[in-house]
Image (spheres, rainbow, N blue to C red):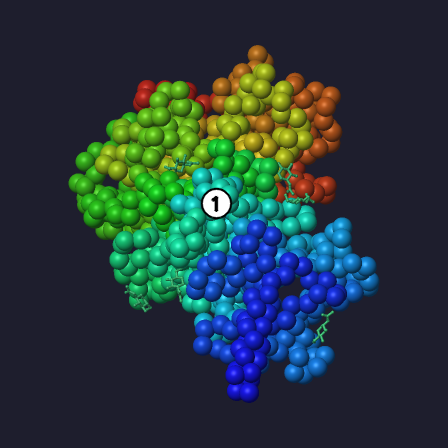
Amino acid sequence: MEIFTMLFVFTSLLFSILSISNTKDIITPSVSIRDGETLVSSGGSFKLGFFSPGYSSNRYLGIWYNEISPLTVVWVANRENPLTHLSAGALNITNQGALVLLSDTNRNSIIWSSNTSRKFIRKPVAQLLESGNLVVNDGNELVWQSFDYPTDNLLPGMKLGWDLKTGLNKVLSSWKDADDPAPGEFSFSIDRSGYPQLVVKKGLRAQYRLGSWNGLGFTGSPELRSANELFKFDFVLNESEVSYKFELLKDELHSRLLLNLSGGLQRFMWADKSLSNNIIYSAPVDRCDTYDLCGAYAFSFCRLGTDPQCSCLQGFVQKSPRYQNSKNASLGCVPKTPLGCSNGFQNFTRAKLPDTSSSWTNSSMSLEECKKMCLRNCSCTAYANLDISGGGSGCLLWFGELIDIKEFDSGGQDLFVRTALLGLDDVKTSKPSGVKKKAAIIASVGLLGMGMIILGLVFYKRKKKLKAQGKMKNIREKNFDFECGNEDMELITFDLATVSRATDNFSNNNKLGEGGFGPVYKGTLIEGQDIAVKRLSKCSGQGIKEFMNEVILIAKLQHRNLVKLLGCCIEGDEKMLIYEYMPNKSLDYFIFDDTRSKFLSWDQRINIIGGIARGLLYLHQDSRLRIIHRDLKTSNVLLDKDMNPKISDFGTARAFGADQTEENTNRVVGTYGYMSPEYVVDGLFSIKSDVYSFGVMVLEIVSGKKNRGFYHPEHKLNLLGHAWTLWIEGRPLEVLDKMLDGSCPLPDVSRCIHIALLCVQQQPEDRPNMASVVLMLGGEGSLPAPKQPGFFTDRNPVEADSSSTKRESHSINEMSVTLLEAR
Ligand SMILES: *[C@@H]1O[C@H](CO)[C@@H](O)[C@H](O)[C@H]1NC(C)=O
Ligand SMILES: *[C@@H]1O[C@H](CO)[C@@H](O)[C@H](O)[C@H]1NC(C)=O
Ligand SMILES: *[C@@H]1O[C@H](CO)[C@@H](O)[C@H](O)[C@H]1NC(C)=O
Ligand SMILES: *[C@@H]1O[C@H](CO)[C@@H](O)[C@H](O)[C@H]1NC(C)=O
Ligand SMILES: *[C@@H]1O[C@H](CO)[C@@H](O)[C@H](O)[C@H]1NC(C)=O
Ligand SMILES: *[C@@H]1O[C@H](CO)[C@@H](O)[C@H](O)[C@H]1NC(C)=O
Ligand SMILES: *[C@@H]1O[C@H](CO)[C@@H](O)[C@H](O)[C@H]1NC(C)=O
Ligand SMILES: *[C@@H]1O[C@H](CO)[C@@H](O)[C@H](O)[C@H]1NC(C)=O
């Protein structure tokens, strides 16, 4: 009896063991998988069945490697809803093609289901493919697949990312713990908020980024290129999907990418099943990958092997002043000087590109176009090539803060970061020495033709003398006390090497011309920006004083009709000003040349006159300082690529107190032909002396003739005198440039000449101010009758009195001259 009972127990046990090893190869509405049964893939690599993870007794439906022990589960169906009793579940398939996991104990309760949108399928079949993908077919096409619902493992051929047609986002999520496959805190996904990038997040917070695709691999793991011998990556970005997958290149290989319990990514790869624990890659690679380490703070980067690991990008400093001297960037960095709309970029090489969540792309642009695109938008902070394969192509732009940059020892790619500092690699932060500073305070030097004489001596003597005379204005003293490149100047110090390189060592080929104070060169910075370099010649009339003056004044000025100063360079004897480059040279280059003047239509001339007037109005009234230029002339009006005028050369300009209208100088600086009588004769200058020069320029622009050196067979008058004569004779239009004949509205020409004559009247108080001039130029109302201009003959009184031949030669060359008036 007992034997029989035991036999019975034995056989039923045997039966149950047999039933446990009972394997199937398909599921149909009539074939289900019960706990203890498994579905095996065609080649035998994978198995689907019920399992209990770790020490848990809960049952889950999952897929694991058939031949690998310990049990390595790659997919779980009912992650969040386990069966709590052994042998309690069954996986059926419905006539709609939905897989349903049913509980035996709680009849008909659905533990998990793969929903489908299909109403009825004649012969639904579920099958486990050799790839590890559980698929449902209707005989022809795919109805559902487990690859679309990944858990914590990415298998070869499985796509991570977005199906844009269905909106399905395939994300890896870690297990909660070794005993519980429910989704844990960590996820690995493609973030599409900007240019797509691979991110591991903890909850909603980024933990680390593998980064964006750059054609060869992901920017965060340059060592892992898609082209290797064992496997390849594939990144697809088109209208229908944004996805990442990998594929093995050798049949005998197996691999999986696991998002593990602590949020690490581990790529396992093996050929021999006993080595299935072989990890060939893991992320994060190092501490620098940690998004929060420095990444969460803007404009810093992480470098391996240095301590501390986070530093501010070049040109940026610690946000918190308390830490400004420490290299610890973990509080975030800010630009040293406002980035504004600067057009300088630094080439940050070997970079893991910053977070692309606020980025913009165009896949067909070149790097050069990309740079231009970035320049166009002031909130663009960096650019890079989108695709670095095949020499580089495409454009990736960042807006706002740059976050999570890492510098690799090797690999990585070039990132171009906008910076207020031009030629940044070469910027010297050292301040000018005390000697230079003193030199900068020099009050007055510059004897004509003598250049700079032992500055120190002159400085002390002169300053004492002037102080004693009480003539030195506080405003000037204050203005000269500065250092090129200091914070509130918002100016950049270039070093000599940079400028020298940009101008090809000041080669003659790059020489644009010779100003009154030295040669001007064209240059090109490494970043590609064109510049004009004004090099103060060592023996020029423009001393340190004028140089500093120009720097101070123009650095504070911002107007579209004023030329923009980019920076300066003071090194040893060298003093240079670096300006934006004006491709169309200066106004005199056009209007006084028979051929080129043809290219200046009346409309362009009017536009130029209006532009100069507005620039001058800004100088006189609207800028923070009241400024008198003192050397306005056509060669100091530069033209940009659209022929817009920009006033340049502020070497002789003077800042005025707001309550001041006139100043007396013992040093007359300017250019004959443009200087007003009261200035040349009495050294009195005011905004009205600039108005006079403006009037002269207007007549020159309209006539195409120079005021000085004007020649007429019938009289010995200069251009002003000639225009005045024609005016009183009632035929002012004869002043007009022959080139313009018949092409311009004569009333406008007449009005222009009228305004010019008002500007050049003898008495300063008769001349309009620039505000009135701007109104008159734009208006149509009646104008007062002009009185006789000052200086309508060729020879200026001062010059006539003078015996200096040197001065004569200067004036002939249209150079700015400095007169020390005998007092
Ligand atoms: C489906 O599952 C239930 C158990 O929940 C089982 O009773 C039934 O026989 C299964 N159907 C098929 C066709 O296997
Ligand atoms: C599948 O079920 C989920 C909820 O479990 C639902 O949000 C989704 O729309 C369903 N998909 C289809 C194709 O019915
Ligand atoms: C997107 O890329 C995938 C994979 O290369 C391709 O199958 C699909 O046709 C593409 N879709 C479009 C709209 O180009
Ligand atoms: C997860 O992976 C990381 C490497 O990426 C590793 O350092 C960590 O030990 C792993 N955690 C577990 C629990 O295996
Ligand atoms: C950097 O500053 C942060 C915040 O003050 C601090 O927690 C960290 O320890 C500092 N690191 C170093 C290396 O000084
Ligand atoms: C950036 O620097 C790298 C490395 O020095 C160089 O190869 C590359 O040409 C530079 N790019 C530009 C645009 O200057
Ligand atoms: C990308 O840039 C190219 C070349 O500049 C341009 O023709 C194209 O319209 C741009 N595409 C987009 C979407 O901006
Ligand atoms: C600059 O780019 C930002 C971000 O794309 C955009 O919001 C802004 O309108 C752009 N500005 C200009 C002037 O194009």
Amino acid type, mark 1: Glu
**Residue at the spot 49% in from the left edge and 42% down from the top edge:** 250
The quarter of the rendered structure image containing the N terminus is: bottom right
For image coordinates 65% across by 40% down, the residue present is: 777
Q: Residues within 10 Å of mark 1 (few under 14, many from 20)?
A: few
- Numbered disc 1: secondary structure: loop
Residue at 37 percent of width and 28 percent of height: 503
User: x%, y% of residue 157?
Assistant: 57, 49
Q: Is residue 349 above or below residue 265?
A: above
Q: Nearer the viewer, residue 383 or 207?
A: 207
Q: Is residue 318 left or right of residue 187?
A: left
Viewer-proximal residue, 462 or 248?
A: 248
In the image, farthest residue toward the top:
713
| Residue wearing tag 1 | 252
Is any part of residue 785 visible from this angle? yes
Residue 425 at what x, y percent from top left?
34, 42
